[in-house]
Image: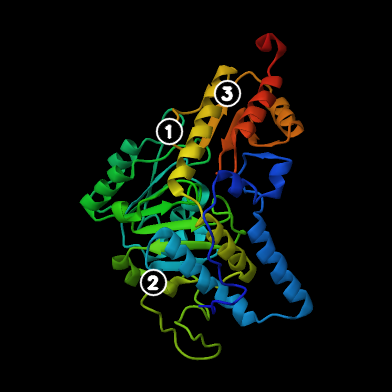
C-alpha cells in the first residue's frame, strides 16, 4: 500500500451529515440531480484527486508506480467499506469482466437469470455453450420478475443464479434469503450485481453469503467509470481463472517479461489491468462514502423516493411496479407527452430519465426535499391541460 503521507492515500476524515455531503457537489447549485442510475455529478474530493493527478501528469511530476498502486489501495479501501478481507476482492474494470470470468469457470449446468436483467449481468451467460450451460431466462410478470419465479426455475444441477440487487428499469429488489436457500439446496452459485445500489443501500454479505458480488463504482459509489470490484466467497476462489491474463495475473512484485503464469491464491488471480486515474478517483470516493452514516443514508433515500412515487401518482402517473424499500422509482406517463415531460424537467433544472412513457428517478444522499418538489412541479406542468384543470 502507499505510505501514509502519499497523495494517493485516503485521509482520515470526520463524519458528514446530509447537508455536509450535499455541499460536496457543485453541480447541485444548478441541478436537482435524480439521474444517478445513469451517472452522478462529480464530488469535489474526487475531482480534486483527479485534477491534482492531471496536473502532476502535465508537469511530469509523477510516478507511474504510485498511480499503479492506487488500485491496490482502492482494493483495501473497498474491502474495508464492504467489511470483507481484501484477499477476497478482485480489481476489475467492469461488472461484465467479473460476470464473464465467473461464466468461464462454471461447471456444466443451467444458468438461471431474469429475462429482463441488465445486459452486463445477462449477456456473459448467453455467450456460454448452450449445450454445456443452457440459460434459463425467467420471464417477467406484471412488469418485473418475481423472486418466486426465479426460485421455481432452480433445479438439481443448476450451476448459477444471476441477479441484480436493484434494477433501474423498475426499481425492483429480489428476496436474497429465498434465492440463497434455493441455490444452497442444489449446490448452485449465486452471482449478485450491486452496481445500482451499493453506496446508498445496505447489503449484508455475511448473512446472504453470495458466491460472487460485483460492483461497478461509477454510479452510487461516485467513482470514475472504470473502477470495479468483485468479492468472491473463499471456497470459490480456487475455481476462478483470469479471463484476460496479463502482468497483473501474478502476485506482487509484478514481473514484466518471460516467466510462467503462477496465479495467486487470493482474488487478485483474476485482476485485470487497472485504469490508473479511475482508481485514484475511486480512493477519494470511498473515503467520502465512508464518512456517512449508512442507516441515515438508507432512510433518507428511500423516504425521498417514496415521496416522489406517491406525488407522481397524485399527478395522474401510474406506478410501473409496487414500490419497495428502494431508492429508484419508476412511473408510467400514460397519455401524458413523454417529450413534454422531458422538456419541462430540463427547463426546471431537473436531471431525471424519461424513456418513452416512463419517468425514472434515482435518489442519492445528496438529494433533498427541494429536489423532489422541483421535479413534481415540472411534471405537473407537463400534464395535458384538461387533466391539469
In this view of the protein, which residue sits in the foreground, 264 or 253? 253
Q: Residues within 10 Å of mark 3 (few under 14, many from 20)?
A: many
Mark sitting earlier along the chain (3/1) = 3
Provide the residue designation for mark 2: 87
Q: Which residue is mark 1?
A: 324
As helix, strand or loop, the secondary structure at mark 2 comes to helix
Rendered location of residue 248, percent (x, y): 51, 78
Disc on the earlier residue, 1 or 2? 2
Q: Which residue position holds label 3?
A: 312
Quadrant of the rendered structure where residue 266 is? bottom left
State the quadrant of the C terminus: top right
Quick check: marks 1 and 2 in contact, CB under 8 Å? no
Front residue of this view, candidates 69 and 98: 69
Instruction: Please report the residue visible at 24 percent of the width from the left and 56 percent of the height from the top.
Output: 187
Q: x%, y% of residue 361?
A: 58, 36
Residue 52 locus on image (x, y percent): 71, 69
Asked whether residue 16 is in view, the answer is: yes
| Marks 2 & 3, CB-CB < 8 Å contact | no
Report the residue that reaches farthest toward the front. Answer: 14
Q: CA distance from mark 3 to mark 1?
A: 16 Å
Q: CA distance from mark 2 to mark 3?
A: 45 Å
Tell me if 278 is positioned left or right of 120 in this view. right
Q: CA distance from mark 1 to mark 2?
A: 34 Å
Residue count near mark 1 (Cα–Cα under 10 Å), binned few <14, some 14–19, many ≥20: some
In this picture, residue 62 sits left or right of residue 103: right
Callout 1: helix, strand or loop?
loop
Amino acid at each position: 500500500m502507499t505510505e501514509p503521507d502519499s497523495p494517493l492515500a485516503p485521509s482520515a476524515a470526520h463524519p458528514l451529515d446530509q447537508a455536509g455531503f450535499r455541499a460536496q457537489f457543485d453541480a447541485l447549485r444548478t441541478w436537482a440531480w435524480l439521474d444517478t442510475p445513469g451517472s452522478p455529478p462529480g464530488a469535489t474530493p474526487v475531482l480534486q484527486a483527479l485534477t491534482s493527478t492531471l496536473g502532476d501528469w502535465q508537469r511530469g511530476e509523477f510516478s507511474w508506480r504510485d498511480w499503479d498502486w492506487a488500485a491496490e489501495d482502492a482494493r483495501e479501501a473497498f474491502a474495508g467499506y464492504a467489511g470483507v478481507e481484501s484477499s477476497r476482492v478482485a480489481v476489475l474494470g467492469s461488472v461484465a469482466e467479473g460476470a464473464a470470468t465467473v461464466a468461464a469457470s462454471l461447471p456444466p449446468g443451467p444458468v438461471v437469470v431474469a429475462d429482463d436483467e441488465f445486459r452486463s449481468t445477462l449477456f456473459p451467460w448467453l455467450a456460454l455453450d448452450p449445450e454445456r450451460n443452457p440459460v434459463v431466462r425467467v420471464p417477467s410478470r406484471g412488469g418485473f420478475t418475481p423472486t418466486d419465479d426465479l426460485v421455481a426455475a432452480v433445479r438439481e444441477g443448476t450451476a448459477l443464479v444471476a441477479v441484480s440487487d436493484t434494477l433501474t428499469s423498475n426499481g425492483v429488489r429480489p428476496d436474497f434469503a429465498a434465492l440463497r436457500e434455493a441455490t444452497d439446496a442444489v449446490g448452485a452459485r449465486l452471482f449478485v450485481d450491486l452496481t445500482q445500489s451499493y453506496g446508498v443501500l445496505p447489503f449484508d454479505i455475511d448473512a446472504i453469503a453470495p458466491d460472487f458480488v460485483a460492483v461497478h463504482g461509477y454510479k452510487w459509489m461516485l467513482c470514475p467509470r472504470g473502477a470495479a470490484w468483485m468479492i468472491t466467497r473463499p471456497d470459490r476462489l480456487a475455481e476462478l481463472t483470469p479471463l484476460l491474463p496479463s502482468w497483473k495475473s501474478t502476485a506482487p512484485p509484478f514481473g514484466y517479461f518471460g516467466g510462467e503464469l503462477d496465479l495467486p491464491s487470493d482474488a487478485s488471480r483474476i485482476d485485470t489491468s487497472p485504469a490508473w486515474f479511475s482508481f485514484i478517483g475511486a480512493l477519494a470516493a470511498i473515503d467520502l462514502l465512508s464518512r456517512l452514516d449508512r442507516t441515515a443514508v438508507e432512510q433518507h433515500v428511500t423516504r425521498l423516493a417514496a415521496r416522489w412515487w406517491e406525488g407522481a401518482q397524485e399527478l395522474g402517473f401510474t406506478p410501473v411496479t409496487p414500490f419497495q424499500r428502494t431508492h429508484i422509482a419508476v412511473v408510467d406517463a400514460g397519455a401524458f407527452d413523454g417529450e413534454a415531460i422531458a422538456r419541462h424537467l430540463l427547463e426546471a433544472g431537473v436531471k431525471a430519465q424519461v424513456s418513452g412513457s416512463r419517468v425514472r428517478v434515482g435518489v442519492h444522499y445528496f438529494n433533498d426535499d427541494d429536489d423532489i418538489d422541483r421535479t413534481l412541479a415540472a411534471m405537473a406542468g407537463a400534464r395535458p391541460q384538461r387533466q391539469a384543470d
